[in-house]
Image (cartoon, rainbow, N blue to C red):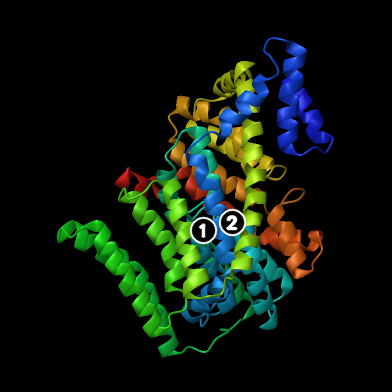
């Protein structure tokens, strides 16, 4: 009854959150076993969670970076670093997405933020609109894989998994996806005889390389001073930040300070300075300092506008989570989750087969549901089976999120597809055809991440 009503409401065109809450309420009226006000109680308790406080702050941090002109700095830095390669702007597209992924946390924000710059630059340099759109769509999937990640926060809360471990788990898979996409760009460049889009300049390249070395070397230096030299952590980091801002002021770096956002976030969580939720607040403060005071590209009027947009987005996300909490509770109470577990386990006890079936299911669901809604529905169904089969839940979280990100590239509900179609002024049909070739590197990365869990779990096991 519960499933039938939910599918009926979804087929009627209702938003997924209303369909979940409505199906639960209708079932309670029909069954008359529990008072209807339990729906309100369960929905409120579903969002009464400390880890969920990270959601609005990560959304705010991404919006601040998007509106502070940081995207141009990131693009120019990536251009200096890899623009001289064959198919240069294709490589720039991927590298810029990797960097911006450390700030936005969502694929849609990445597509909207960098997409405008990347597609225009590639079209101006003679690349086809379809190639530019397809690559931009594929690279946008890096947003929720490389930390910070909004879907990881939702999954961690729903599956009772450490958000910090999920953040660490996304670093190597994100790098692997970027490598697969850059290899695909190289193949296109070789096939079509493309050259570089920027003349190699030792000075520009050395400066970009120096920025990259500083980003890598700064946290290493802080760790050595604190752990090996025994200096006080807070004072050491504070002095290090002052020196970092001084170096940025003297050498006029393109993107050192924005790139430091994920470095500070991951470093703070792994060293125990703050929790992921507190890290989200720290990321917002960092973005405000850069946008309002250091670069001065963000006005107070823009800041208020960004805050209002964040409230709107957060309300949507949390309403979905609240509706899913009552729906998931009803699925458990009516025995649906245990029935699905029994059915799957009667079919196979092999983890690899279950992962194959789960991938197929999640790819299908991702085409029809927004990632937050899909996570909140699928976690109660699939996580108990993972626990019975001994599949690591951090590993499964990466697999789930990547599947749902690929779903964002497909109609009928692929939001990244619609965003880029609007930016590039292409029809949805042409945009869909442009994205299809880029599913090959994404699905290749999905296979590796699914069946080589060491790629996902190596970093979390080092720190957790």
Q: Which residue is mark 2?
A: 141
Q: Where does residue 47 sit, x and y in percent of width and height?
A: 57, 35
**Would you call the spot at circle 2 few (<14 residues within 10 Å), some (14-19), or many (20 or more)?**
many
* Residue 361 showing in the rendered view: no
Q: Which residue is mark 1?
A: 177
Q: Residue at x 38, y 59 (%)?
A: 264
Give SS at disc 1.
Answer: helix
Q: Find residue 112 and report its image quarter.
A: bottom right
Q: Find residue 37 and report its image quarter.
A: top right
Horizontal arrangement in the rendering, residue 402 relative to residue 221 (left or right) = right
Query: Quick one: 294 or 129, which is closer to the camera?
Result: 294
Assign the N terminus to one quadrant of the image: top right
Disc 1 and disc 2 in contact, CB within 8 angstroms = yes
Query: Quick one: 376 or 312, which is closer to the camera?
Result: 312
**Would you call the spot at circle 1 few (<14 residues within 10 Å), some (14-19), or many (20 or more)?**
many
Query: Quick one: 46 or 374, which is closer to the camera?
Result: 46
Q: Is residue 259 above or below residue 370?
A: below
Query: Quick one: 385 or 68, which is closer to the camera?
Result: 68
Q: Where does residue 145 sit, x and y in percent of width and height?
A: 51, 53
């Amino acid at each position: 009854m519960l499933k039938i009503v939910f599918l009926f409401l979804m087929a009627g065109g209702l938003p997924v959150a209303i369909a979940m809450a409505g199906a639960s309420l209708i079932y309670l009226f029909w069954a008359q076993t529990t008072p209807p006000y339990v729906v309100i109680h369960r929905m409120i308790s579903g969002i009464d969670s400390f880890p969920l406080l990270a959601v609005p702050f990560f959304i705010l941090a991404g919006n601040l970076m998007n509106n502070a002109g940081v995207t141009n700095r990131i693009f120019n830095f990536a251009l200096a670093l890899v623009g001289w390669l064959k198919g240069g702007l294709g490589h720039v597209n991927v590298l810029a997405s990797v960097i911006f992924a450390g700030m936005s946390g969502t694929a849609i924000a990445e597509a909207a933020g960098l997409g405008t710059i990347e597609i225009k630059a590639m079209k101006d340099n003679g690349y086809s609109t379809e190639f530019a759109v397809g690559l931009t769509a594929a690279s946008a999937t890096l947003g929720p894989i490389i930390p910070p990640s909004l879907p990881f926060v939702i999954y961690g809360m729903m599956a009772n998994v450490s958000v910090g471990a999920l953040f660490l788990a996304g670093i190597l898979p994100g790098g692997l996806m970027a490598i697969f996409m850059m290899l695909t760009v190289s193949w296109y460049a070789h096939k079509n005889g493309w050259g570089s889009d920027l003349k190699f300049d030792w000075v520009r390249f050395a400066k970009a390389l120096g920025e990259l070395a500083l980003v890598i070397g700064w946290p290493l230096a802080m760790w050595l001073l604190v752990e090996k030299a025994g200096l006080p952590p807070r004072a050491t980091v504070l002095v290090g930040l002052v020196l970092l801002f001084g170096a940025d002021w003297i050498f006029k770096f393109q993107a050192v300070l924005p790139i430091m956002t994920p470095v500070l976030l991951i470093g703070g969580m792994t060293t125990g300075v703050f929790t992921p939720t507190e890290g989200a607040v720290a990321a917002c403060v960092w973005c405000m300092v850069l946008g309002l005071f250091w670069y001065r590209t963000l006005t107070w009027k823009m800041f208020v506008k960004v805050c209002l947009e964040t409230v709107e987005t957060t309300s949507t996300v949390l309403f979905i989570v609240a509706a899913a909490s009552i729906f998931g509770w009803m699925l458990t109470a009516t025995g649906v989750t245990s029935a699905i577990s029994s059915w799957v386990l009667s079919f196979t006890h092999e983890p690899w087969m279950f992962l194959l079936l789960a991938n197929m299911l999640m790819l299908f669901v991702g085409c029809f549901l927004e990632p937050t809604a899909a996570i909140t529905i699928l976690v109660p169904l699939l996580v108990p089976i993972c626990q019975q089969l001994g599949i690591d839940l951090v590993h499964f979280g990466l697999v789930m999120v990547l599947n749902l990100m690929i779903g964002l590239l497909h109609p009928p509900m692929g939001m990244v597809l619609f965003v880029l179609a609007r930016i590039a002024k292409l029809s949805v049909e042409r945009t869909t055809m442009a994205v299809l070739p880029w599913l090959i590197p994404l699905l290749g990365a999905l296979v590796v991440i699914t069946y080589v869990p060491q790629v996902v779990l190596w970093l979390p096991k080092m720190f957790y």
